[in-house]
Image (tube, rainbow, N blue to C red):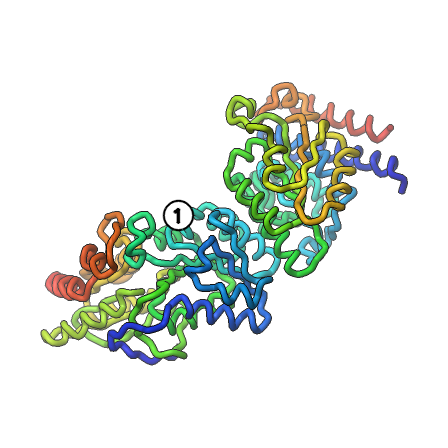
Amino acid sequence: MSFTLIGKHEKDSRAMRDAYVTAVHDLMAKGEPVVHIDCDLEGCSNVGKLAKEFPNNVYNAGIAEANAMGIAAGLTATGKTVFMHSFGPFASRRAFDQAFMSAAYAGLPVHVIGSDPGVCAAFNGGTHMPFEDMALYLSVPDAVVIDPTDYAMLNCLTGKLAASGKFSYTRLVRKGFTTVYADGSDFEIGKGIELRDGKDVAIIASGILVDEALKAEEALKAEGISAKVVDMFTWKPLDEELVKKCAAECGCIVTAENHQVGCGLGSVVANCLVKNAPVPMEMVGVQDRFGQVGPEDFLRKEYNLTADDIVAAAKKAISRK
Amino acid sequence: MQKAEKMQELRVFAAQIRLETLKTIGSLGFGHVGGSMSVADALAVLYGGVMNIDPKNPRWEDRDWCVMSKGHAGPAMYATLGLKGFYPVEEAYTLNKPHTNFPSHTDRQKTPGVDLTTGSLGQGMSTAVGAALGNKMDGRDSHVFVFVGDGECDEGQVWEAAQFAAHYKLDHLICFVDYNKRQLDGACEDVMSHGKGIGAKFDAFGWNVIDLPDGNDVEAIYDAVQLAYDVKGKPTCIVLNTVKGKGATFAEPSGAHSSQPTPEQWDEAIKASEAAYAAVKAQ
């Protein structure tokens, strides 16, 4: 693992989906037996050019996610490395029994890609806004469950997932995201990253909340509070050693996620803490609510997913020490 | 070998599969007898006269595949694979016992020769289609056979998979519908009827359809598979009009989905099946 933190809170001009497409393209160009299965969302995942260049490796299953998942499992049984893509709710809720039984239970490591996670579904609204997709996949034994942070990370992890031989679920923010890491950074599945060192509170975040956590660290520093910031992009297997280190060095923890806290990052971190090193903890994320329609900025405020919310949670956690 | 001789061999194999299926389920005392017995003849044709397989190398890349999407017919698969030499057939008598390799529903990670895991109905259809697509991608001539139940055809996923297979012209996919007319809660017609018929539905989805009035006739099944091999550009569905529980004295009259007969009834059924096997062999 070797990464370069940029962390200037600047929007990336690229589409994050292209980090995935570029990585898959590289694998296909090398002749790897990689297949992309889509569900009438090739325009959204932007695999159109990929399909033209590798027509034998890209298939559209139409609007039939459950079948697409089964096709992916069957293809995997013939030795293919298969990525199956749909919007997050349909790649999880809609096709979950198929993902569970046909793929994971059967020992067939399909790689599921769910796009527009949480508030990123914005104008598609509550029906398309999964705050529970990760929860479903966390329940699958031995699954790898990832909420990637930015372009560089998704680009790196796509190849690592293909080589992992593990069933996996990965969220995909299609467009509009903030650059955190420099291109070419290297990441390891299951290893969290300490982005800032601190001693008063540890903020453990993932996905679009990582940049908010970095902003929160700066705001806290201005008030004389020293915060550690961790990017915990792999929710499963969780980097338990790093969680324990956070507890030991800071004495309290705040988690931050674009997901229900009751069945997500906050929960897996709490599980780890309770078993090992109970310390005061606060969870920033969706509090047992459904999604709704609106611009992403509005939704981030509506569900309390901002740097200000992390700052408030950090102060509360510190006060409980 | 002359065809008549081959068909006789298949009839004997089918009788042997029935007997071993009863012994396998009988070792536990209860199970899915009905839907296991109805597919015995088709399994005899596939494993006895049609499929390219290597019992010593179950994952041989160029093999033909068989997916029991109606996974509760696992015991019939276990009897068939055991008799073909994938493992000693008696091993299947551990059916559903702790740490067995022979669970109620077929599992590719447990049983040598089982190509895909099934149990949640409808799913084996999609995975079979995926396997057929994978073989096509690699330019293999392998065929994929998949068994779906008539009750299983209630599942929407069967039809999602059917339209995918037709769209991608997977002519090396052959689906058997075990049309034994009964599902768990009773007659299919009463529980959930099939509109213009299961065969008509597959036809509407762009498949080649062969309807066999006697789906327990090995020669008719064998001939249907040969016809299916010649059809290019579309998958084939062979509707097997079968008798649920066929050959099980306690199950055939009722067509029950699962059975828990008394020990005396088991003895009677196994003796009758042994007699049927001996009679076919003597022909």
| Residue B147 visible to the viewer | yes
Q: Callout 1: helix, strand or loop?
A: helix
Above or below, B114 against B17 in this view is below
Residue A249 image point, x, y percent: 22, 72
Say which quadrant the N terminus of chain A sits in: bottom left
Say which quadrant the C terminus of chain A sits in: bottom left
Residue A284 image point, x, y percent: 21, 59
Above or below, A85 against B11 in this view is below
Q: Report the residue marked by disc 1.
A: A93
Residue lying at 78% horizontally and 25% vertically, measured from the top left: B275
Residue B165 image point, x, y percent: 60, 47
Front-lying residue, A72 or B87: A72
Q: Quadrant of residue B146?
A: top right
Q: Quadrant of residue B161?
A: top right
Direction from residue A72 to residue A227 in the image, left or right? left
Front-lying residue, A126 or A227: A126
For the view shown, which residue lies furthest in the top direction? B253
Mark 1: which amino acid? Arg
Q: Quadrant of residue A157?
A: bottom left
Chain of the residue where label 1 is placed in the rendered structure: A
Direction from residue A211 to residue A60 in the image, left or right? right
Above or below, B17 against A295 in this view is above
Residue lying at 27% horizontally and 58% vertically, measured from the top left: A266
Direction from residue A182 to residue B73 in the image, left or right? right
